[in-house]
């Protein structure tokens, strides 16, 4: 096992690629690890807040998950695992979360997340045995694009209806997504890469000036930050397993498979190293990390596109960087002061950020269609996408006795089943 820690040290030269089994000198590697923590930070913290989870636990479990991924893939796949947004809709549906404060039904949602991780592990074992061809047959780009888009569209009501209590809050949501937009378009370098985090900070400053300064809304309460300890043990939560929650949340594994598959293909293209033989192990690792996270009170996790973007920009693919980033996340996870800082963010500011994030998820689905040149002149593609988008966005629900399958679930299963049925009819 010690062999996976044996990186070959190289010197940083402009334009040079640092391979997964290489590393820069440790001070530079540590600096790169900090950069990857910054890259994953905004989304990894935002996702648990939107579901009513403890952000300290989520950060801690992102570090644990990344280390598990590193060990299970033999230290050969450079990736950071953070909170997955694919869980937000189904967790909200399964737990009845209202969008503010701690999630009262957290344990039930955790049971579903653990079930999802188990299903993901089984898919990984199957891929290990027979390869990935079957995934691409069952979930072509038209299906995965539609399902990813639905995740964002189905969530639209959460920030708009539940995270703005009055007109002032609604205006603050608008200020927030404007701040994010300005950073995205006019900033450069790492500031632009951190558009969500920087936009959130700017909007929070504006909110504090208008409320604490001018008395226009509910003032920010910073007393929790001052009173919180720098270090302490997080409050873990054990999962509770119910059939309805597990059936609703477990299918998210399908999205995670598509997501991880795309990320690994991207890393393969960037590094020039074929990672297909490691695909099954990567799925298993992500599944194990999700099971561990859900068992402790954390969100489901996935490989992060944000960190792949950092690798693309720096041309540094060393897995040593991700070990450093994971260790930093572990330290942050044991800081109640860090958790109090996150909890102090005003709800309408989080609502404005949520509008941006959910919109980006929806557009990411459309990007899958564009990147894969999905032909919507073919009726099979057109019908699968059209029906999936509407039943998912409209929260089309089917009941089976006491169990109800909500919009994201019906859209996910519906897209896969429609694709298979319409293909069969065409070939009949």
Image (spheres, rainbow, N blue to C red):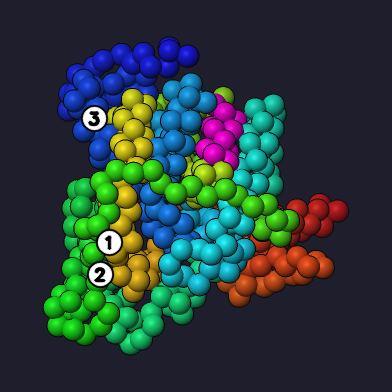
Q: Main secondary structure of the magenta part?
A: helix
| Mark 1, secondary structure of its residue | helix
Res. 30 mark: 3
Can see residue 48?
yes
Residue projecting furthest to the right: 428
> Could you give the CA–CA distance between mark 1 and mark 3, rounded to whole angstroms?
31 Å
Residue extending furthest toward the bottom: 167
Instruction: Please state if 386 lies on the left or on the right of 185 as rendered.
Output: right
Disc 2 to disc 1: CB gap under 8 Å: yes
The residue positioned 57% from the left and 36% from the top of the image is 288
Residue for point 78% across, 68% down: 402
**The magenta segment:** 278-292
Q: CA distance from mark 2 to mark 1?
A: 7 Å
Which circle, 1 or 3, is nearer the viewer?
A: 1
| Displayed quadrant of residue 224 | bottom left
- The x, y position of residue 267, in whole percent, is 42, 34
User: In the rendered image of this protein, does residue 133 appear above or below residue 188?
Assistant: above
Q: Which is nearer the eye, 109 or 117?
A: 109
Q: Which residue is mark 2?
A: 221
- Between 203 and 195, the one lying in front of the other is 203
User: How far apart in space, not on screen, are marks 2 and 3 (Cα)?
Assistant: 34 Å
| Left or right: 370 as drawn, with respect to 346 | right
Mark 2 crowd level (few <14, some 14–19, many ≥20, 10 Å Cα): few
The residue that label 1 is drawn on is 224
Q: Position of residue 86 (x, y in %)?
A: 52, 55
Which of the two discs, 1 and 3, labels the residue nearer the N terminus? 3
Do labels 2 and 3 touch, CB within 8 Å?
no
Residue 65 x, y percent position in the rendering: 47, 37
Question: In front: 10, or 326?
Answer: 326
Q: Is residue 48 above or below residue 335?
A: below
Mark 1 neighbour class, 10 Å CA radius: few under 14, some 14 to 19, many 20 or more: some
């Amino acid at each position: 096992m010690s062999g996976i820690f044996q990186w070959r040290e190289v010197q940083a030269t402009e334009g040079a690629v640092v391979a997964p089994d290489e590393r820069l000198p440790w001070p530079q590697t540590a600096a790169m690890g900090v950069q990857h923590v910054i890259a994953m930070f905004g989304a990894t913290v935002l996702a648990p807040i939107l579901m009513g989870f403890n952000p300290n636990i989520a950060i801690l479990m992102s570090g644990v998950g990344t280390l598990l991924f590193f060990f299970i893939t033999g230290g050969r796949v450079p990736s950071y695992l953070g909170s997955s947004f694919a869980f937000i809709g189904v967790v909200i549906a399964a737990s009845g979360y209202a969008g503010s404060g701690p999630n009262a039904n957290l344990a039930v949602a955790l049971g579903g997340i653990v079930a999802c991780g188990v299903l993901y592990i089984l898919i990984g074992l199957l891929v290990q045995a027979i390869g990935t061809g079957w995934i691409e047959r069952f979930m072509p780009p038209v299906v995965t694009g539609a399902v990813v888009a639905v995740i964002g569209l189905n969530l639209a009501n959460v920030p708009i209806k539940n995270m703005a209590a009055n007109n002032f809050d609604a205006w603050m949501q608008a200020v927030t997504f404007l701040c994010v937009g300005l950073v995205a378009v006019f900033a450069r370098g790492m500031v632009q890469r951190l558009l969500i985090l920087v936009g959130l900070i700017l909007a929070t400053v504006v909110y504090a000036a208008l409320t604490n300064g001018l008395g226009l809304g509910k003032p920010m309460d910073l007393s929790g930050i001052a009173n919180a300890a720098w270090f302490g043990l997080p409050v873990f939560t054990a999962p509770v397993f119910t059939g309805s929650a597990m059936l609703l949340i477990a299918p998210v594994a399908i999205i995670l498979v598509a997501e991880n598959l795309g990320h690994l293909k991207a890393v393969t293209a960037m590094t020039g190293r074929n990672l297909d033989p490691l695909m099954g192990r990567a799925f298993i690792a992500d599944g194990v990390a999700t099971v561990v996270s859900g068992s402790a009170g954390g969100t489901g996790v996935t490989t992060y596109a944000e960190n792949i973007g950092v690798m693309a920009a720096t041309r540094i693919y060393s897995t040593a960087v991700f070990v450093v980033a994971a260790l930093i996340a572990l330290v942050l996870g044991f800081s109640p002061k860090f958790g109090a800082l996150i909890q102090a963010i005003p709800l309408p500011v989080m609502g404005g950020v949520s509008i941006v994030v959910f919109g980006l998820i929806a557009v990411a689905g459309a990007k899958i269609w564009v990147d894969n040149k999905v032909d919507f002149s073919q009726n099979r593609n057109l019908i699968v996408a059209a029906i999936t988008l509407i039943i998912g966005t409209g929260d089309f629900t089917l009941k089976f006795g006491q169990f109800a399958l909500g919009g994201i679930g019906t859209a996910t299963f519906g897209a896969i089943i429609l694709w298979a049925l319409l293909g069969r009819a065409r070939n009949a």
